[in-house]
Amino acid sequence: MNKKAKILSPLLLGLTLVITGCNTNTPDTQSEQKQEQPQKETQNEAQITELQPLNMMTLQITFTEPLLEEDVNTENLENIKKNFEFDNDMGIVNVPRLKTGTESTYIVPVTIQKPGTTYTVSYKGEEKQFFEASKEKINIRQTKQVTNDTFEIESFKEDGVTDYANIIEAYRADRGDLAFQVDNENKDENGEQYQVISSLRDRVVTMTSDKGEKITANYVPFTQAADGRQAPKFRLPEGQTLTPGTEYTVTSDWATIKNPTLTAEEIAPLTIKSAEAIDSKSFQITVDKDPGMELFAGRKVQLKGDDGSNIEAQYRFSSRKGPVGIFDVLNDKTLQPGVKYTVVPMNNWATADHVSLIAK
């Protein structure tokens, strides 16, 4: 059972004026005070009024007011992490996301909570709040291999599990029929309660072979709610592949997987059909068929120039349109006009038979 802590913190009201040297304000002083007023108002920070651990990797936090745009912008993640001061080595792993239908209640993904631990958290230096670690893991139905080095774990809404993408304001417009609203207890209009999968950024799972070999697989960004499914992808370390015929069991410290085993098969890699330069820093690649999911994610290619140069490029997350994906040049390098580059997939995620592009 989730434990909820309701916290009410009084707001500091009023301003103190310090007057020195005279009893009458000069025009310059009055102007300065008028300018100070709105500045002080913008410094009024939101405070935590309610905190609820939803599961081992997710908090639900209600604030006195909506958070500032700069405090939920993914480009500011490293600074936003500093706003939340936890003890016991806890921290947030991605930005807070406003729940649909609320004014100031956010889904906040955190590092894995340790059962039996009491945590404290302070937001932007305000009073410390306490909460007990949740023991709840996410219920995952099954796992499946998708490439020679990548597999997925899949959950279903009908099992009472929803990805947070379906219930947050930031993604509501793009989720279509998948978007819905839940109350403070994460129940929908029919009273159905849901476990909430928060951001899987930096999450890992473990694969154990039938020979006892353990492999840590990392979450592939932007795959947790892609293509209308709750089937996040996990990838083996660079250079490693699943051994055909070997049975693997997937386990996690944040999920319980009902059907955790798979028997690895040899899966043919994608085939790159063509490549075309977009500008000096990017190009698009077309494969032989629509992968139907973010199988481009995290992939790299090497470009070998006829001038002897070698350039690495990586897929631009979420740029796939059918079988076409955009790749960006890495390490501050650029494509040189007129140079012919041969495309070589790295780590065998695809094949390319004499595919090349000429930089513009």
Image (spheres, helix red, strand yellow):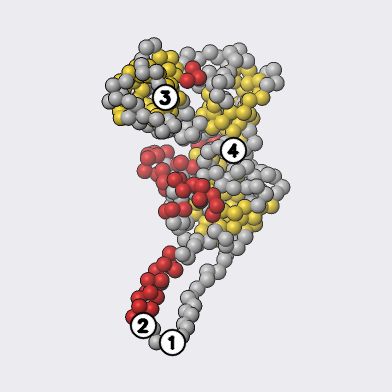
Q: Residues within 10 Å of mark 2 (few under 14, many from 20)?
A: few
Give me the C-alpha separation between circle 1 and circle 3: 69 Å
Please name which of the two marks, 2 or 4, marks the residue nearer to the observer: 2
Q: Earlier in the sequence, mark 4 or mark 1?
A: 1
Q: Earlier in the sequence, mark 2 or mark 4?
A: 2
Q: Is residue 82 above or below residue 263?
A: below
Question: Tag 3's secondary structure?
Answer: strand
Mark 2 near mark 1, Cβ–Cβ under 8 Å?
Answer: yes
* Numbered tag placed on residue 311 in the rendering: 3
The location of residue 316, given as percent across then percent down, is 40, 32
Q: Nearer the viewer, residue 343 or 81?
A: 343
Q: Is residue 207 above or below residue 90?
A: above
Please name which of the two marks, 3 or 4, marks the residue nearer to the observer: 3
- Residue that appears at 51% across and 33% down: 156
Q: Residues within 10 Å of mark 3 (few under 14, many from 20)?
A: some
Give me the C-alpha separation between circle 4 and circle 1: 65 Å
The location of residue 260, given as percent across then percent down, is 62, 26
Question: Tag 2's secondary structure?
Answer: loop
Q: Nearer the viewer, residue 85 or 159?
A: 85
Name the quarter where the C terminus is drawn: top left
Question: Tag 4's secondary structure?
Answer: strand
| Amino acid beneath label 4 | Ile
Taking 85 as reference, is 277 left or right? left
The location of residue 271, given as percent across then percent down, is 41, 15
Circle 1 is placed at which residue position? Answer: 22
